[in-house]
Every structure is written in C-alpha cells, then in structure tokens.
Amino acid sequence: MAVIESAWESHPGYRIDLVVHPGVARVWHGDLLLAESNAAIRVIETDHVERLYFPESDVRLELFESNDHHSICPFKGEADYWTLTASDPPLENVFWVYRDTFAQVAGLLFFTRFVHDLP
C-alpha cells in the first residue's frame, strides 16, 4: 500500500471548497445515464477548474467494475478507479471515488468524479 502524505501543512493557503450544487446533475455516455443526483457538490480548488462530484450512491454502479488503478492527491487522499463495462468496448477509469480522505476534505468521502472527456 502506498504511503499517502498530506500537503495541507506545507501549503497553508491552499483551498478546496465544497459547495452544494442546486438542482439535479446528470452524467451521460451517449444515451446511457451513468449518474443522477440532487446531492452533487461543486469542488472549487486552488489552481484547478471547478468540478462536479456525485455521491457514490447516485452512480449506477451496475454499469461499472472497480479496477486496480489508484491515484493519490496530496490534498484529498487516495482515489479508486472504475471501468464502464456497459459500453463496447469497456472504458477504463471513467470515474474515481475517495473512500478515505484527509480531514480537511472529509465532505468528499464516498464522492465520485467522472472524467471530463467521456467519448
């Protein structure tokens, strides 16, 4: 298992704000609905484009399988990736989820972010 070191202490001015997204948010791949939520959040992060995150419970997990890919963000923690198996061919790493976060972003626990360039 990888050692995950937080960068919060060494970057005191860094911010990640979690803002409730008003209304219903959806993610589509063609005509296939991947996620729908009235509890999505906007993640506004220093030096990044604002992104929309979905509660994992609002993702149609039956369309996906977890895979072995992981990434580490020094401000959020380790992310686990999922493959869209309901497409032909399957699309790897379509979304990731944080199942363990740093305390500063505990509101991201079990939230997913879809890649922004789904084909």
Image: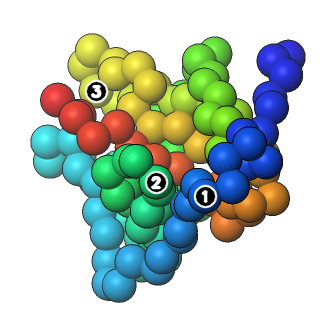
* Kind of residue indicated by mark 3: Ser
The mark nearer the N terminus, 2 or 3, is 2
Quadrant of the image occupied by residue 97: top right
Going 67% across and 47% down the picture, which residue do you hit? 11
Q: Position of residue 110 (x, y in %)?
A: 66, 55
Q: Is residue 41 left or right of residue 88?
A: right
Dot 1 lies on which element?
loop
Badge 1 is on which residue?
13
Q: Secondary structure at mark 2?
A: loop
Q: Quadrant of residue 14?
A: bottom right
Q: CA distance from mark 3 to mark 1?
A: 42 Å
Please say if 47 is above or below 55: above
Q: CA distance from mark 2 to mark 3?
A: 34 Å
Asked if the residue under mark 1 is in contact with the one under mark 2, i.e. CB atoms within 8 Å, the reply is yes
100 vs 90, left or right, is right
Q: Residue at x 47, y 79 (%)?
A: 20
Q: Looking at the image, what colour scheme do you see?
A: rainbow
Residue hosting label 3: 87
Residue 110 is tagged as none
Query: Separation of disc 2 and disc 1 at Cα?
Result: 9 Å
Which numbered disc, 3 or 1, marks the residue that appears first in the sequence? 1
Q: Is residue 29 left or right of residue 4?
A: left
**Crowd around label 1: few <14 · some 14–19 · many ≥20 (10 Å):** few
Q: Is 83 displayed left or right of 81 in the figure?
A: left
N-term-proximal mark, 2 vs 1 = 1
Q: Nearer the viewer, mark 2 or mark 1?
A: 1
Q: Read off the residue under disc 2.
A: 46
Answer above or below: position of 114 versus 70: below
Marks 3/1 in contact by CB < 8 Å: the verdict is no
Q: Amino acid at mark 1?
A: Gly
In the rendered image, the vertical position of residue 88 relative to residue 102, given as above or below: above
Horizontal and vertical percent position of residue 108:
63, 59
